[in-house]
Amino acid sequence: MRMNKTSYSRWYVSLIIGIVMIALGLVLILKPLGVANVIVKMIGIVLILNGVSDLYVIFGISSAAKEAKRAFNTVDAEATVVNDSSDRKDKSTGSSTK
């Protein structure tokens, strides 16, 4: 309770975390197999969610790559033909090249 007097405004957060840790420690001591069962199930759920997330990302990247390939295969350009070869002169003879 000294944290309350030392102007630590969120001292109650440390108190709550301490109480929760004591409770979890007691549950772990009293029912170790039950806790292990819950932890294994939580790990399984996290792995399933991770796999679903990976598949979502893979499909998203795949469709973005296909769209980018289509966009880069389509060329939209304007061209202007410049015919200036008849106006050039041969440097060595001084005559025009046609």
Image (cartoon, grey):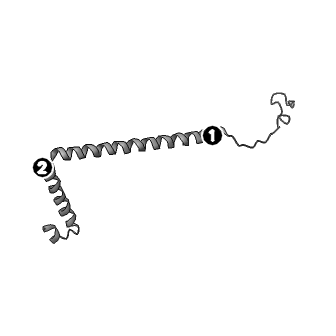
**Nearer to us in this view, 45 or 87:** 45
Q: Please give the label number shown on residue 97.
A: none
For the N terminus, which image quadrant? bottom left
Q: Please give the label number shown on residue 30.
A: 2
Residue in the image at 16% along x and 70% along y: 4
Residue in the image at 69% along x and 40% along y: 75
In the image, taking residue 69 as reference, residue 10 lies left or right, namely left
In the image, taking residue 1 as reference, residue 80 lies left or right, namely right
Q: Amino acid at mark 1?
A: Arg
Badge 2 element: helix
**Nearer to us in this view, 81 or 39:** 39
Residue 47 screen position, x and y as percent = 34, 42
Earlier along the polypeptide chain: callout 2 or callout 1?
A: 2
Dot 1, crowdedness within 10 Å: few (<14), some or many (≥20)? few
Residue 96 screen position, x and y as percent = 87, 32
Q: Quadrant of residue 51?
A: top left
**Nearer to us in this view, 81 or 70:** 70
Residue in the image at 16% along x and 56% along y: 23
Residue 98 screen position, x and y as percent = 87, 30
Q: Amino acid at mark 2?
A: Leu
Q: Is residue 7 above or below residue 92?
A: below
Question: Which one is in front in this view, the residue at disc 2 or the one at disc 1?
Answer: 2
Badge 1 element: helix
Residue 79 screen position, x and y as percent = 76, 41
Cα separation between marks 2 and 1: 62 Å
Residue in the image at 55% along x and 41% along y: 63
Residue at which label 1 appears: 70
